[in-house]
Image (cartoon, rainbow, N blue to C red):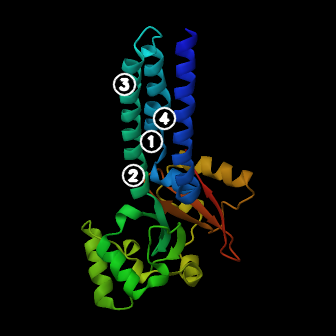
Amino acid sequence: MKFRSKAFGLHLAGSALALTCVLGSLYFGWYRWPGWYLTGASHVALLLTGIDVVLGPLLTLIIANPRKPRRQLARDIGMIVLVQVSALTYGAHTLWAGRPLYYTFSNDRLELVQASEISPDEVALARKTNPAFAPYWYSRPRWVWAPLPDDPEEAKRIMTQAVLGGTDVVQMPRYFRPWDAGLRALATQLRKLEDQKVYSPDEKRVLRKRMAALGLPADEPVTLTMWGYSRPLLAVFDPDTLRLRSLIRVN
């Protein structure tokens, strides 16, 4: 049993270290709040944890028989590690492709934009016409304003294709502008909590309590909904400076 426990402990430590390095670098590089929540990355992280930190070491605990020939034992553990590495590589690639690149304000909402949502053609156009806001492999998440273009025909075309499920302006970094440049437009879209239609009455009661606990005014037009792939967040702004004060979960 001592031999099995030692093999299990070593395998667990190695697996946990590898997973921590991968998830830690992705989290601190791209997925810090609100990215981790809005992308739903916890589902991938839990799957990786189950395979790499739970299943792998447990299988080693089962097969680590001191009477088994060392070559056979090394082969068996090697197969387990190979499966773990494959799962970790796949999970890391999935998280990399879905990493947050922009938090956008456009029209009447805040919205997360992931790397996988921006096509190579749009990346090329942005690098040519708007390089300051173009995405690169090393780009970190940025808060930007994504207005429709000044050309009414082009704006109409973008709105039409967005309604039909095509590319929206938030996936076109060639049109992005500095966050501060959009604050005047953002101010016109702020609403009272009660006027946010996306939340149910019960959710609004929860949000009201959380706003009160943070000292935020629920009965003033200071809120905007922020969208991603989880339940929308409630963004609360300072009415005077338009500084983002908090992003509040309802769940």
* Disc on the earlier residue, 3 or 4: 4
Camera-side residue of 63 and 115: 63
The numbered mark at residue 140 is none
Query: What x and y, as percent, mark residue 232?
Result: 49, 55
Query: What x and y, as percent, mark residue 119?
Result: 31, 70
User: Which circle, 2 or 1, is nearer the viewer?
Assistant: 2
Residue type, mark 4 in image: Thr
Cβ atoms under marks 4 and 1 closer than 8 Å: no
* Disc on the earlier residue, 2 or 4: 4
Q: Circle 2 sits on which residue?
A: 93
Q: Circle 4 sits on which residue?
A: 49
Q: Image check: 237 left or right of 122?
A: right
Camera-side residue of 125 and 169: 125
For marks 2 and 4, give the CA distance.
Answer: 15 Å
Residue type, mark 1 in image: His
Q: Circle 3 sits on which residue?
A: 75
Q: Circle 1 sits on which residue?
A: 43
Cβ atoms under marks 2 and 4 closer than 8 Å: no
